[in-house]
Amino acid sequence: MSVFESYDIRGVFPKEINEEFSYKLGRLIPKLLKCKNVVVGYDVRVSSKKLFTFLTKGLLEENVKVTSVNACTTPMLYFASFFYKFDAAIMVTASHLNKEYNGFKICSKDAVALGYDSIGWKLEKNINRSFKTKKTNLKVKNLDLSKDYENFILNNFKKTNLKVVVDSANMMGYLDSKILAKVCTVKNLFDKPDGKMPNHEDNPLIEKNLKYIIKEMKEGRYDLGVAFDGDCDRVVFIDEEGSIIRSDLIAALISKYLPKGKIILDSRSSKIVEGTYLGKTIRSVSGHTNIKTSMRKHQALYGSELSGHHFFKEFHYADNALLAVLYILKIMDKEKKVISELVKPFKKYFVSGELNFDVKDKDEKIMQVKDYFKNYRKIQQVDGLSLYFDDFWFNLRKSNTEDLLRLNIEADSEDKLKEVEKTIIKIINH
């Protein structure tokens, strides 16, 4: 598959993404976005600083003013984009992927994330072009955004007596944990930045990567566990007993305390969120760029994706894992209840988790499943196929990042879940 993916650019370093590739991006992006004032940041992967150096070299040769915020989280780069009013922003990161990967996230003005449809295909079309080196007197300027960012993030949050464990996976979470320490007591795991990821991978959705924080939660006396991904745009929550809390349950909890308006959910999230929020709930195609587009279109207060992204209107519709943590701490402090007690009312349904199928004709399989299930109460085709019945619903969609068909089922009972799961799997595998 191409390194130019639906939401960003990702590949193995140096096989798929290297210094030359990064330099060419620096030459191409200003031509495509007509930008003159660009902010750039990077994570602590071993290859990130190299890619940053060649990316900025290309930008400078296109006569672009380049400002570096140096090692940062992706939300920090979003902040720099809208707060300091840059024309464009580029983050060097592979997000939650393992250490051998790297990549780029690109934004236009106001932290508007650009995916394949808006810029990726144009970059892919031109990436093999040759460029002659240009002389330039421009140099990269450095910007320390730490104080402005901290003030912005903590604006509506006060000090609590809560105790939180933070697992940063030796990646960018060490920056967020410092800000979090202003609001609660923090116990850090793997907060020393090391792009070799010596303790575990930086993807908190893979359960084996959570074994250390789960162990700490079970053995200590803490109120909440927080596991960030590599660039801190996603977060997984662990309760005081060491149990993983699904992201859509966190969304339900946050939505309960939001004013009446609109919120955005991806196609896989539990219907408990719709049953909790008093305003209007709108389903969106999965993927952070798609959720952000829906957020802006509907001027939504909040958005959530099952993969651990949480989006906020006050953060210019962008995702911010730290803000999600602060919202949860604020609710816990207000209610004086443990997190497991707060999410318990939302655990009404039984879920399959995401089941993946490697099949050739994905569209045909989706049609076969649709033809089998006739008496549905509601149909949505926002992102693949979602069929709703009285006691269950499911979403079947093609992955945007892998060559897979993905299935999510939610049912009122475990027996119904097993029955539906067995039926759909049989259709897909036939």
Image (cartoon, grey):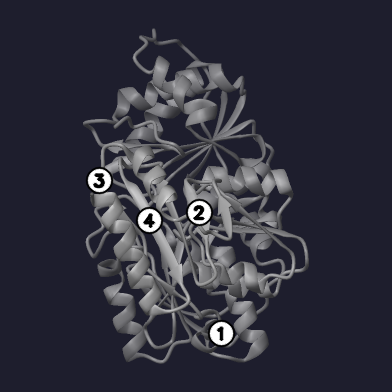
Residue count near mark 2 (Cα–Cα under 10 Å), binned few <14, some 14–19, many ≥20: many
User: Disc 1 marks which amino acid?
Assistant: Pro
User: Disc 2 marks which amino acid?
Assistant: Ser
Q: Which residue is mark 1?
A: 345
The quarter holding residue 279 reads: bottom right
Q: Which residue is mark 2?
A: 386
- Residue 384 rendering spot, x and y as whole percentages: 47, 46
Residue count near mark 4 (Cα–Cα under 10 Å), binned few <14, some 14–19, many ≥20: many
Sequence-wise, the earlier of marks 4 and 2 is 2
Whole-angstrom CA distance, mark 3 to mark 2, is 20 Å
Residue at 60% in and 53% down: 283
Q: Which residue is mark 4?
A: 407
Whole-angstrom CA distance, mark 4 to mark 3, is 12 Å
- Residue 131 rendering spot, x and y as whole percentages: 39, 10
263 or 209: nearer the viewer? 263
Residue at 64% in and 30% down: 87
- Residue 135 rendering spot, x and y as whole percentages: 46, 11
Sequence-wise, the earlier of marks 1 and 3 is 1
Sequence-wise, the earlier of marks 1 and 2 is 1
